[in-house]
């Protein structure tokens, strides 16, 4: 890239007439083309392109916000208040990253921080009950044991409860047996978070959730019984999805489900996962 | 730039309490910003003699009314006593209270103006200093009290003494800044032609002072309708442009004032055809190239940003008003692009506003001009822009806009961008906090994949998760764009993440 020294050289050379530079060929692109060359899917939907960018020159008034800092410098100069003491208010501000999931909307200083958050809380989410898991493996087991009706039937006849440790292929008759195995053989703690047995009690959590509003502005209210400790990694099921989500072009209900994999986060995640995050991490501004 | 040198000591922390000093500075700046928002930002200059700043520190305490009357009596006497009284008075008038007391005394202003317009040169000079102190007040009533002096102030502009002319100019400039009523009177009394003639002075200090006074006139709220037309007619603009040089004998101080005058003219709705004819674009461009060279080689002088900023604004607005076709002849020097990038890199940390304004000019250069867009690649400037993407407060937004300008030119341009790792930049910007940044990133992504669909794969691998996450963003504009891209350009890859159960 053009380094400082190259800048100097270039700027101090004789005039470099811009007309001498090769001009790359221009070809206008028409974005609306997509509906014309549609496959049957598009033609039916008749979606118009939502993109609005056109290149344009901007005129700026002298009162424009973009000029504010420069004007202040000008006036400080007039008032003889220019200082060479470095002032930290003038440093350029670095962008923060924000979780896209409406209602979560947490801020992060770095892309890594954001990605870690996303992968931990929003990635492996069960589309049936919206709980999130730290890995695909645990999610698979969860879905199998909690939402597969066939599982219960099979479990009566054979050992279906598999060990949670990846690579350990032992299976057990009951979840309690598995838990013993985890504790004895794999030295897991007895209160391991991702080994909650399926109880009907978990459904009782739902009434609490209804108290939590789902405004997209993301005003998350802490649950009444939140102690700030993480009881489980489970994320409680949210309220029904935002109406906008349902108004998909095709109008099909399954559009609400993640379209690329059943593991992709469905909608907002409330519950201890995010509330805990709320206390520990940066608050949404 | 004698002014910066002269008063540097004033703003250094006295007792080494840096934190307190910085706190006060910040409060002061906040007040200025608020004033600007209310369009009440007015600044005046106080001319100080070289030997004077010592005197500033040991200013006399505020005089009582009795003492003021005493001094006034002294002025009323003729002879030596008068001169001494006037000198003491000048210092005393630094205090607001003294100013008030004085102007309320019977015949006080009448006497002062009489001395100012009289034939005794010593008294005249002292009286001029007193008037100058009064003009610096921020109380409207004080400025109005000075009105009787204005016809003389204007008359003396065509006098022979450079120092005296300078003093009169700053006094006029301060009064001008004060109120519309004062400006109305000054305009009627012919301030514009007087300044147009005065700017041709061979003295640097006088020229700088004219620039200052003119800038106060042009900054006024009523300027576009009532002042700028006559300024354009007066012929002063050709002199303003002439003085836009980096190494002129008139010094950078004069260039600063002239640049701000031009900015105020151009940024109003005035007809800038005259300026175009007078070569404003060419002047601005060559000055920016010269300054760019200085910045790139590290030989910046203090306050260089004070002249760069208004010149950037002039160029940006001239480009916006007239378009590339009209400006092209005056913009043949491609070095201006490099100069703009030198400013961006040179000032980003200390004066990000300069970087922001430079980016705006580059946007206006690239918006409808494939020549400058091609030059960006030829001069290898894309990495400079990409390095700016982490910075918010308008910087990354402007960068994305100009990248869109470039991409919009066609597939060949998109190819060039894509080869320069634009996708990895987008992976980050698509996750940033500002919705505008995300929206523009999607626009850019769309332009590229619509132009060259073959490269969609390269984006998909790492980028598709960002688009998926965006499906759940609360902003509809953003959601629509992301899903459109997913549907139309990346749909082939919808099977990638389906797990085997």
Image (cartoon, coloured by chain):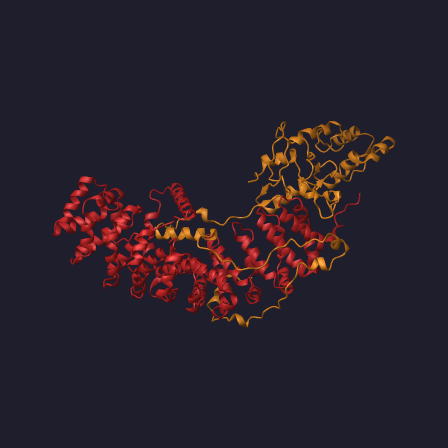
Rendered location of residue B434, percent (x, y) = 57, 47
Looking at the image, which residue is at 55% across and 57% down? Answer: B385
Residue that sits furthest to the bottom in the current view: A20
The color chain B is rendered in: red
Of residue B4 and residue A34, the one placed in the foreground of this image is A34
Left or right, A44 with respect to B26, comes to: right
Of residue A129 and residue A29, the one placed in the foreground of this image is A29
Q: Where on the picture, by quarter, is residue A42?
A: bottom right
Q: Where on the picture, by quarter, is residue B421?
A: bottom right
- Up-down relation of residue B354 to residue B329 (above or below): above
Q: Where on the picture, by quarter, is residue B218?
A: bottom left
Of residue B447 and residue B235, the one placed in the foreground of this image is B235
- Can the viewer see residue A5? no
* Quadrant placement of the C terminus of chain B: top right
- Up-down relation of residue B57 to residue B405 (above or below): above
- Up-down relation of residue B265 to residue A200 (above or below): below
Q: How many marks?
A: 0
Left or right, A110 with respect to A247, comes to: left
Rendered location of residue B411, percent (x, y) = 65, 63
Of residue A171 and residue B264, the one placed in the foreground of this image is B264
The orange chain is: A
- Up-down relation of residue A265 to residue B153 (above or below): above
Looking at the image, which residue is at 69% across and 43% down? Answer: A245
């Amino acid at each position: 890239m053009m380094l400082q020294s190259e800048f100097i050289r270039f700027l101090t050379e004789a005039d470099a007439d811009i007309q001498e530079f090769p001009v790359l060929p221009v070809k206008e692109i028409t974005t609306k083309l997509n509906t014309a060359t549609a496959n049957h899917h598009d033609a039916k939907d008749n979606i118009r392109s939502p993109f609005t960018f056109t290149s344009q020159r901007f005129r700026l008034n002298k009162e424009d916000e973009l000029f504010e800092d420069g004007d202040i410098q000008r006036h400080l100069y007039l008032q003889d208040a220019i200082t060479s003491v470095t002032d930290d208010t003038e440093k350029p501000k670095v962008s923060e990253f924000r979780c896209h999931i409406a209602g979560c909307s947490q801020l992060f200083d770095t892309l890594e921080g954001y990605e870690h958050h996303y992968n931990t809380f929003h990635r492996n989410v069960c589309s049936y009950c919206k709980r999130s898991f730290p890995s695909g493996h645990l999610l698979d087991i969860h879905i199998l044991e909690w939402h597969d009706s066939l599982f219960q039937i099979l479990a009566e006849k054979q050992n279906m409860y598999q060990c949670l440790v990846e690579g350990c292929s032992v299976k057990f008759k009951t979840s309690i047996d598995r838990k013993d195995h985890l504790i004895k053989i794999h030295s897991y703690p007895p209160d391991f978070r991702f080994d909650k047995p399926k109880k009907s009690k978990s459904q009782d959590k739902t009434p609490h959730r209804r108290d939590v509003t789902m405004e997209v502005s993301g005003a998350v209210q802490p649950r009444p019984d939140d102690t700030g400790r993480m009881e489980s990694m489970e994320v409680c099921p949210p309220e029904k999805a935002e109406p906008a989500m349902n108004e998909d072009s095709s109008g099909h209900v399954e559009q609400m489900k993640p379209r690329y994999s059943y593991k992709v986060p469905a909608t907002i995640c409330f519950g201890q996962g995010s509330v805990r995050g709320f206390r520990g991490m940066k608050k949404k501004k | 730039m004698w002014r910066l040198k002269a008063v540097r000591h004033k703003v250094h922390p006295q007792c080494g309490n840096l934190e307190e000093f910085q706190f006060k500075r910040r409060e002061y700046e906040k007040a200025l910003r608020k004033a600007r928002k209310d369009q009440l930002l007015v600044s005046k200059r106080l001319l100080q003699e070289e030997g004077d700043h010592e005197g500033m520190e040991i200013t006399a305490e505020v005089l009582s009314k009795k003492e003021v009357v005493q001094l006034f009596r002294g002025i009323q006497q003729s002879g030596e006593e008068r001169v001494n009284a006037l000198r003491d008075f000048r210092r005393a008038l630094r205090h607001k209270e003294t100013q008030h007391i004085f102007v309320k005394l019977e015949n006080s202003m009448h006497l002062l103006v009489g001395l100012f317009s009289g034939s005794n040169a010593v008294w005249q000079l002292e009286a001029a200093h007193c008037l100058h102190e009064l003009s610096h007040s921020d109380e409207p009533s004080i400025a109005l009290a000075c009105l009787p002096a204005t016809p003389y102030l204007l008359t003396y502009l065509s006098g022979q003494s450079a120092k005296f002319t300078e003093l009169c100019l700053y006094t006029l400039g301060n009064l001008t800044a004060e109120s519309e009523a004062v400006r109305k009177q000054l305009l009627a009394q012919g301030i514009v032609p007087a300044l147009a003639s005065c700017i041709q002075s061979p003295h640097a200090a006088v020229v700088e002072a004219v620039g200052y006074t003119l800038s106060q006139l042009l900054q006024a709220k009523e300027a576009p309708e009532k002042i700028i037309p006559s300024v354009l007619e007066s012929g002063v603009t050709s002199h303003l442009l002439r003085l836009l040089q980096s190494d002129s004998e008139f010094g950078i101080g004069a260039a600063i004032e002239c640049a701000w005058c031009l900015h105020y003219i151009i940024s109003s709705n005035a007809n800038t055809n005259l300026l175009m004819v007078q070569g404003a674009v060419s002047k601005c461009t060559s000055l920016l190239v010269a300054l760019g060279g200085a910045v790139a080689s590290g030989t910046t002088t203090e306050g260089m940003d004070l002249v760069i900023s208004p010149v950037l604004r002039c160029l940006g607005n001239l480009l916006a008003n007239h378009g590339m076709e009209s400006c092209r002849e005056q913009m043949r020097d491609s070095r201006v692009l490099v100069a703009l990038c030198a400013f961006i890199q040179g000032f980003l940390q200390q004066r990000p506003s300069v970087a922001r304004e430079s980016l705006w000019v580059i946007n206006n250069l690239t918006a409808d001009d494939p020549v400058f867009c091609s030059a960006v690649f030829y001069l290898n400037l894309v990495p400079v822009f990409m390095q700016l993407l982490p910075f918010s407060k308008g910087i990354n937004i402007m960068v994305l806009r100009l990248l869109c300008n470039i991409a919009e030119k066609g597939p060949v341009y998109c190819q060039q961008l894509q080869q320069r790792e634009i996708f990895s930049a987008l992976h980050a910007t698509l996750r940033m906090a500002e919705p505008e940044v995300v929206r523009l990133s999607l626009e850019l992504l769309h332009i590229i994949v619509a132009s060259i669909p073959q490269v969609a794969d390269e984006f998909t691998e790492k980028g598709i998760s960002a688009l998926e996450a965006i499906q759940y963003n609360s902003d509809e504009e953003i959601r629509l764009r992301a899903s459109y891209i997913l549907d139309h350009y990346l749909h082939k890859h919808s099977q990638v993440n389906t797990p085997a159960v």
